[in-house]
Image: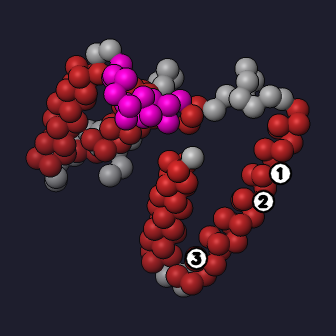
Amino acid sequence: MLGGVVEAGASQASQQMGGLRTAYLTRSPPRAVYYSQMIGTLSGCLIATLVYRIYASVAKIPGEEFGIPDARLWLVTARLVYQQGLPPWALEFGSGAFVIGAIFSILRFVGLRSWWRDLVPSGIAMALGETEFSCTTSFNPFPLITTAD
């Protein structure tokens, strides 16, 4: 439960920084961004609670129809904390991901003014995709093909 609260707080902080950056770029007042995000957070809490209650009255949560994919990530983390071991091939996968990410980072640094720099994926975006791939059964290719830093 504490992990979910920390994750939500980090998400809110990230969204706040993104909003403040957008406000800076568009020359909007930061106070307006802060108030709008507070209103959005409060209304989101109310709407999310209402929607959850509607879904819970219709179907069993978690169940076949509505799973909780984030719970799988926290389960893997809890097993690692209690020394129940890593998944098979975790060391090889992590080592390969490190080497590929390092090569991409070096290429992006070397090609600062080259035309092909934007074609090299960001190592950070790859790390996010690889983390999701290693913890879940579904593969998400979108972080692998992004070029934004």
Count of marks overlaid on the render: 3
Describe residue 28's horizontal placement relative to residue 141 as left or right. Answer: right
On the image, which quarter does residue 54 sit in? top right
Residue furthest left as drawn:
110
SS assignment at label 2:
helix
Q: Which of 124 and 4 is in front in this view?
A: 4
Residue furthest top as drawn:
88
Badge 2 is on which residue? Answer: 46
Badge 3 is on which residue? Answer: 33
State whether residue 8 is above or below residue 31. above
Describe residue 148's horizontal placement relative to residue 5 as left or right. Answer: left
Badge 1 is on which residue? Answer: 50
Q: Nearer the viewer, residue 78 or 41?
A: 78
The residue shown at (19%, 43%) is: 105
Describe residue 141's horizontal placement relative to residue 100 as left or right. Answer: right
* Crowd around label 3: few <14 · some 14–19 · many ≥20 (10 Å): some
State whether residue 108 is above or below residue 103. below
The residue shown at (52%, 82%) is: 30
Would you say the residues marked 2 and 1 are in contact, meaning their CB atoms lie under 8 Å apart? Answer: yes
SS assignment at label 1:
helix
Q: Give the mark nearer the N terminus: 2 vs 3.
A: 3
**Residue stretch rendered in magenta on the structure:** 72-87
Magenta: main secondary structure equals helix
* Crowd around label 1: few <14 · some 14–19 · many ≥20 (10 Å): few
